[in-house]
Image (cartoon, rainbow, N blue to C red):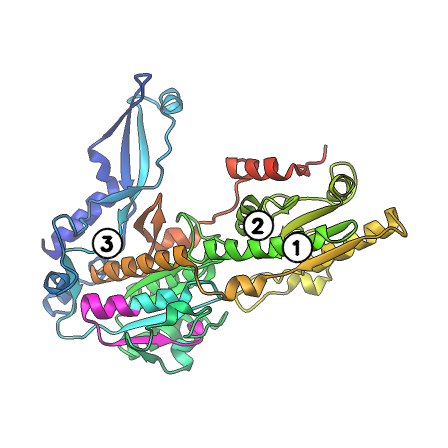
Amino acid sequence: MGDDEHKQQQESTSSDIGAAALPCRSLMSFNITAHYQTAKLPHLTDYLPSSHHHDLIITKTSNPLDRNDFYRPFHGFYISDTDVILRKILYDVAAAAAAAAPPDVDVVLAYHRAGPRSQIYLDPNNVVRAAIVTCGGLCPGMNTVIRELVVGLWELYGVRHIFGVPAGYRGFYSMDPIPLDINAVHDWHKRGGTVLQTSRGGFHLQNIVNSIQRRGFNQVYIIGGDGTMRGALKIFNEICHRKLNIAVTGLPKTVDNDIGIIDRSFGFRTAVEIAQQAISAAHVEAESAVNGIGLVKLMGRSTGHIALHATLSSRDVDCCLIPENGFYLYGKGGLFEFLEQRLKKNGHAVVVVAEGAGQDLIPRTDAQKQEQDESGNPVFLDVGSWLKSELNNWWSREHPGELFTVKLIDPTYMVRAVPANATDNLYCTLLAHSAIHGIMAGYTGFVSGPINGNYAYIPLTEVAEAKNAVNTKDHKWAWVRSVTNQPDFEKN
């Protein structure tokens, strides 16, 4: 297939790959037709003029995996451009039949499936030079992703010029890149944090792209959270504007699991596992005291996924407080009334609070309201210390002279800094290899990630805008309420 044919196929799949309908029949004999529309996946050939192709700035060649001694492709091994993953797999055919207008057609969004392609896009006159950078806060699995990017590039595609960019985005223009090979990274998956080091802020678009161009990088792998992905989108757009033969991909990382579209971000399951250890410790402390309360503050600035999943996994939690569900302290149906009932019944209680919960309740000065960190995020006050103080004040007023103990446990840096567990290590490996295959196929401006259990390529434009908030109207939050029997904190 020529480059023009590739672009035509991309355009056809992005506009309506579902020209062939997907019939959907239920046992009740509903007949609903669904068309699926595939998200447009950016490709180097989209913005490099055809004349450049003849100058061999970008050319197409067979995948070197065909000649790999150990990684031999089999029939059906290569992924085609028409192989997609549906965004939505749950479908109420009865509701669709009632709501759909004739001719009963529903449009389902789809994404290109991740994996190796039979043809790759490389410049034969210019070797591949890959840059890997980690940005933002720490997360279990960061070193695994770096390691697998290096190993995958080295072993699968024969890339020998791989560099780590230290200190996040600012490292592109302020520090020298670090050469990486398979020997240098062989045990990185056993370490927490990031060996490349990281930082927040330092995003200067022109300096970053100038440095990428000057150093001859033609593949850039950016590991980071939602703010980092927004930065990656700006880098991609600037590269397109300059018409540079440089492919950019993002590998979404956030302990909070707040990046949208994908099933989950890497490191999340490890974080939940470590959070459970903190909850268990808080439970022991609370049980061992008269009127004891174990208070656990977990990560989760804008979303409460860690708190929610740790609560469901632990079963020792009496109340789970998350940013998506407001709460209040005093009065009927408030937190203190509920905790007093639990203390009378059980003699102890365990409360889990996400760091972003209750921020509207904490008094702050005008200066504190305006304060931002280096990434431009509002600075949150310590909800754990504030809630501990409020609990002590409440008890001393309502029950003067009676024993009462609040033990606050904040495992934030333990959750962030540990190595990934087995599940997350496997995830990081598949994520890294998916990114490599996509870039080698000439795709750019995309993020790799699991959707409904299968790995897909998602345009950076969508990931940068999507959020993954806890839906307090779905079954998971209902399960939390059934486990804790906590109030809904809705004032009449």
Q: Nearer the viewer, mark 3 or mark 1?
A: 1
For marks 3 and 2, give the one nearer the viewer.
Answer: 2
Which residue shows up at 47% across the image and 63% down it? Answer: 139
- Mark 3, other Cα within 10 Å: few <14 / some 14–19 / many ≥20: many
424 or 464: nearer the viewer: 424
Task: Give the image location of residue 258, x and y in percent.
Answer: 48, 52
In this picture, residue 117 sits left or right of residue 258:
left
Seen in the image, is 106 located left or right of residue 195?
left
Asked which secondary structure carries label 3, the reply is: loop
x 31%, y 64%: residue: 248
Q: List x then y, in percent, for residue 267.
A: 45, 58
Question: Would you identify the image quadrant in which residue 408 lies?
Answer: bottom right
Magenta extent: 150-170
Q: CA distance from mark 2 to mark 1?
A: 14 Å
Q: Amino acid at mark 1?
A: Ala
Question: Is 161 contained in the magenta span?
Answer: yes
Counting residues from the start of the chain, the first of labels 3 and 1 encountered is: 3
Q: Which residue is mark 1?
A: 282
Instruction: Say whether disc 2 or disc 1 marks the residue closer to the N-terminus.
Output: 1
Q: Which mark is residue 307?
A: 2
Give the secondary structure at mark 2. helix
| Residues under numbered marks 2 and 1 in contact, where contact means CB atoms less than 8 Å apart | no
Which label is found at residue 485?
A: none
Tell me the kind of residue under disc 2. Ala
Residue 326: where, in percent of width, then height? 65, 44
Label whose residue precedes the other's in the sequence (3 or 2): 3
**Picture quadrant where residue 197 is located:** bottom left
Kindly identify the residue that appears in the image at 27 percent across and 55 percent down.
42
